[in-house]
Image (spheres, rainbow, N blue to C red):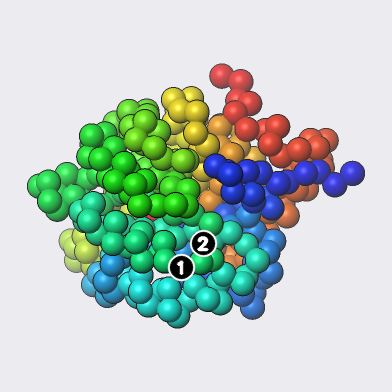
Amino acid sequence: MKPSTAVSVCGIALANPIVAASGTFGYGLEFRDMMDLRALGGIVVKGLSKDPIDGNAAPRLWEAEQGMINSVGLQNIGVRAFVREKLPALSTAGTNVFANIFGYAAEDYLEVVRVLEDSEGLAGYELNVSCPNTKHGGIFFSNDPEALGELIASVKLVARRPVIVKLSPNVARIEPLAVAAEQSGADAISLVNTFVSLAIDARTRKPRIGAGFGGLSGPAIKPIALRMVYQASRAVRIPVIGMGGIASGEDAAEFLIAGATAVEVGTATFWDPTAPRRIARELESFLVQQKIDDVRSLTGTLEL
Ligand SMILES: Cc1cc2nc3c(=O)[nH]c(=O)nc-3n(C[C@H](O)[C@H](O)[C@H](O)COP(=O)(O)O)c2cc1C
C-alpha cells in the first residue's frame, strides 16, 4: 500500500514534508519546467525586503569541503515587484508558497507583511531573523530572545497568515530562542539558517568571498543541524521545520526523527535542480522499505 506522506504544519496541509528552502529556489517559477511543483510540500521564495536589494560584491559563492559558503547579500526585487511580477503565476502552481521576509528593524518586516497581506496566493510567512537589528546597535534578532520576541509579537499583530520563525544556528544555545519564538506567538519555527564561516585563499591571503565572511550550508552542516533541530523540538510544542544539508530521502527522515514535522531542501538544489522532487520520492520509497504507513509517525522518535 502507498504510504501516507501528507503532513500539517500549523494548519497548512502539505502533500509531503519536503519544502524548497529560501534563497536556493529563486521565486519558484524558475523551476516550473523542471518539475511538477505540485509534487512538493511547498516552496519558500528567496528573502523579500521592503525595497529591492542588489546584493553583495562577487564572488558570492565558494564551494567548500562538503558544503557551500555564500554571501549573496539577500539580493531580491523587493516585495512590491514580487507581488506584481511573481506571485500571480506562483499562486497557480498548485503548491504552498511561503514568503521569506527579512529586515533590519521591526518596521521593515511590518512593511513587507502589510504589502503581502493585501495579496492572495500565499500559505504563510517565514521570518528570516538572522539580520542585525540596526536600531539596536546591530545585535542580531536571532541572538537576543527579547528582541526576537518583540519582533514576532509585532508581526503577529498584522499577519493573518501563519508565521514561521527561522532561527539562526549561530548561537550558543538554541532552546531560549525557540522558546522566545513560541511564547511571542510564532506558529512554527524553522532551523537552521547558515553557519557564519570564512574561506581563505592562502596565496592572495584574501577571503574567497567578496564580502569576507559567508554562510556555510550543505552536507557539512547536517550533523550540527540535526542536533539543533532535536534540541529545539524538545523545547517547544509548536511544529518545527528542519533543514541543513538534506540531500536524500533518508536525510529528510533523519530530521523528522529528530523532531521535525517538515523539512526544507536548500544547497542540494545547486547540484541537482530537481533535488526537492527527488528527495520527496526517495522519502516515500524509504517509508515503503521500512513498512511505515504514515510519515507523521517518524516525527520525534529519536531514541536518545
Ligand atoms: C545561496 C543561498 C541563499 C540563501 N538565502 C536565504 C534567504 O534569502 N533567506 C533565508 O532565510 N535563508 C536563506 N538561505 C539559507 C537556506 O534557506 C538554508 O537555511 C540553509 O542553506 C541550510 O540548508 P541547506 O544546507 O539545505 O542549504 C540561503 C542559502 C543559500 C545557500
Residue 24 appears in the rendering: no
User: Who's the residue at 34% across and 47% down the image?
Assistant: 157
Which quarter of the rendered picture does the C terminus lie within? Answer: top right
* Residues at circles 2 and 1 in contact by the CB criterion of under 8 Å: yes
Question: Whole-percent x and y of residue 17?
Answer: 63, 48
- In the image, is residue 74 above or below residue 223? below
Above or below, 109 against 118 in this view is above
> Which of the 4 image quadrants contains residue 279?
bottom right
Mark 2 vs mark 1: in front:
1
Q: Position of residue 181 (x, y in %)?
A: 36, 36
- Quarter of the picture holding the N terminus: top right
Mark 2–mark 1 distance (CA, rounded to whole Å) = 8 Å
* SS type, badge 2: loop
Viewer-side residue, 286 vs 206: 286
Residue 119 numbered mark, or none: 1
The residue drawn where x is 31% and y is 65% is 49
Q: Is residue 10 above or below residue 51?
A: above
Residue 144 position in % (x across, y down): 23, 36
Q: Quick one: label 1, few (<14), some, or many (20+) residues within 10 Å? A: few
The residue at the point 48 percent across, 25 percent down is: 234
In this rendered view, identify the residue nearer to me: 180 or 220.
Answer: 180
Report x, y in % for residue 260: 56, 37
Q: Is residue 150 visible?
A: yes
Q: Which mark is residue 63?
A: none
Residue pointed to by mark 2 = 122
Left-right relation of 25 to 288? left
